[in-house]
Image: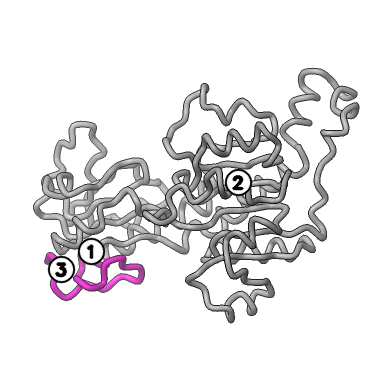
Amino acid sequence: MFKIWLDDALLPSCAHLLEGIAEPIGPSPTLEGIEEAEAFICPGNVRYDGARMDRAPKLKVIARLGVGYDNIDLAAATARRIPVVYAPDAPTISTAEHAWALIMAVAKKIVKAHAALHTTGWGSFWGHEANKGLELYGCTLGLVGLGRIGSRVARYGLAFGMRVLAFDPYIPPERAQDIGITLAPSLEDVLREADVVSLHAPVTPETRHLMNAERFAQMKRGALFVNVARGALVDEQALADALRSGQVGGAGLDVFEGEPIGLSHPLLAFDNVVVTPHVASRTVAGHHRIWETTLVQALQVLRGERPEHLLNPEIWETRRR
């Protein structure tokens, strides 16, 4: 029976996938038993570096519970001939819907109105011009990244009657045309024209703090900003400054550079910022899909079968067996 190390509690709805095939071990703060692990099942809040891999000499596969894999040292895994798999399709629907939940909440000032009704009453919200919401019909939605999630967010924007403009240097123009949106030649073009800017890019050395003081200054004054991708894409101090000055009219954030954040985090001080604790993909269906995709691929590798979503395919023929 295979031994699979879990750094998160096994989702009950997926426990049947391991019955009679694999024995789950962990999680343990002391890493007791990790030396027996043939697979790592990896959430996003644990760092998987070479030292952790070396504690498991029988390790044959690292499987990420989700789409972002910046917490896994891919180079270290590749050097050790350990395949790394992930679940890029699993969070797409839930995350795209959450992006739109944040867009709507910020545009319509829902959280602020809700708080007013609970504290200062009905009339207190009605009495201020600044409390009027944004009608999205006819506005421009600017997407930074047009992958799986960005493409779905784009389709939702079209359904709202928005013009959708996207920047993604890795996407051919034909893909944007198929969706029915415009592919911008530069990030600056998107920021300058968009009434709502939504991030859907991975974190790389090139994209870290992609949205900084210079980029926020390029946005249309008063435009809204949404991030359900990765917190490290944003210079949070620059965002706070842009919100304070009115350059950014409001923000919806599910991710932060350092997680979890505390109650003193500066972005929590703004009543035009809606925040959630990195839960965009965490619906019942989305969570199940992530676990199912991850476990199925881990078991495939353990059985010697090539998985669908392999991050380092170059080592497949010389992988650990």
- Dot 1 crowding, Cα within 10 Å, few <14, some 14–19, many 20+: many
Residue at image location 17% in from the left, 45% down from the top = 52
Which quadrant does the N terminus fall into? Answer: bottom left
Q: For residue 283, say whether it is visible.
A: no
What type is the residue that disc 2 sits on? Answer: Phe
Asked if disc 1 and disc 3 are in contact, CB closer than 8 Å, the reply is yes
Residue 115 pos. (x, y %): 74, 26
Return the residue at label 1: 83
Q: Tell me if residue 251 comes above or below residue 169 in the rendering.
A: above
Q: Is residue 63 inside the magenta stretch?
A: no
Question: Is tag 1's residue or tag 2's residue first in the polypeptide sequence?
Answer: 1
Residue 272 pos. (x, y %): 69, 34
Question: For residue 181, which quarter of the picture?
Answer: bottom right
What type is the residue that disc 3 sits on? Answer: Arg
Q: Is mark 3 on a helix, strand or loop?
A: loop
- Dot 3 crowding, Cα within 10 Å, few <14, some 14–19, many 20+: some
Return the residue at label 3: 319
Residue at image location 44% in from the left, 39% down from the top = 257
